[in-house]
Amino acid sequence: MITIKKLSKSYVDNSSNQKVFENLTYEFESKGVYSVVGSSGSGKTTLLNLISGLDNFESGSIQVFNQNLGKLSVEEKSALRQKYFGFGYQFHYLLENLSIYENCLAANFGEDNGNINPTLKQLGIEKIKNKFPSKISGGEKQRASIARALSKKPKVLILDEPTGNLDQENSLVVQDFLLDFAKENDSLVIYATHDVRFAKRADKSLNIIEHSIVQE
Ligand SMILES: Nc1ncnc2c1ncn2[C@@H]1O[C@H](COP(=O)(O)OP(=O)(O)OP(=O)(O)O)[C@@H](O)[C@H]1O
Ligand SMILES: [Mg+2]
């Protein structure tokens, strides 16, 4: 369960003060599928970074599995992510000197690796598993990043525009796969997307409007 209370977040630099969230309160249940929509620059990626402890905030609180992110050290937040979270990000951050399969292994932290090959197969990228990230297409990288995020079967799966680089057919493959994953593993899945139809397939759709969340 992730509980956000009275959260305010701005980006401040010398020249400007960019307010992203103001007095935001929202609770994610411990399982289920949530989509996050909102115009470009509204704060979708920022929200995902905040709840995973990758970004700081000025005031309010975020509780992740009963731990208060504002009170944890950088190392403790990292341990929390390692234990519970999987990430598939807009810019995929695959390790360039590891093959796709090895990228999945590395994210698995020595846990059971038996899930990696079936995941690659279901996402239609088994045939490129021994290639390096620089030798595959953008859409293949995106699916590789999702496979990596899923291979350790995280309790919380965070995805930033997971279908952004995909054609319609592969987008649907990924959508079906993610929704099935959430159901089968009782996971919490939170994804940001610009795809309205994909957003509607979530149990709950959150729209970021005027520095807050409107649930649709
Ligand atoms: N590291 C940063 N430093 C300063 N401002 C930032 C930073 N990251 C994001 N912002 C600003 O915060 C606001 C929210 O950005 P964010 O990336 O969360 O938007 P988004 O909804 O994910 O947009 P998109 O749909 O384009 O990915 C934007 O105005 C952006 O310019
Ligand atoms: Mg974004």
Image: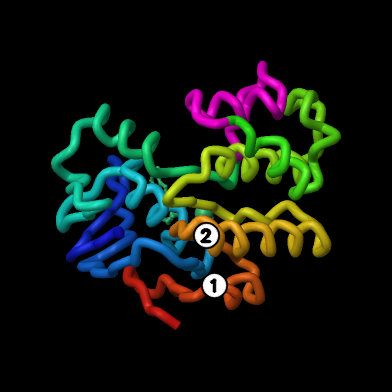
Distance from mark 2 CB to nearest ligand 2 atom below 8 Å: no
Identify the mark nearer the N-term, 1 or 2: 2
Q: Is residue 79 above or below residue 216?
A: above
Which residue was labeled with disc 2?
191
Residue 176 included in the magenta stretch of the image: no
For residue 39, side relative to residue 135 (left or right): left
Which residue is situated farthest in the bottom direction here? Answer: 216
Q: Residues within 10 Å of mark 1 (few under 14, many from 20)?
A: some
Q: Nearer the viewer, residue 10 or 80?
A: 80
Identity, as a three-letter code, of the amino acid under mark 1: Ala
Residue 32 placement (x, y as % from top left):
45, 67
Q: Which mark is residue 202?
A: 1
Where, quadrant-wise, is the C terminus in this rendering? bottom left
What is the magenta range?
92-112
The chief SS type of the magenta part is loop
Image quarter hosting the N terminus: bottom left
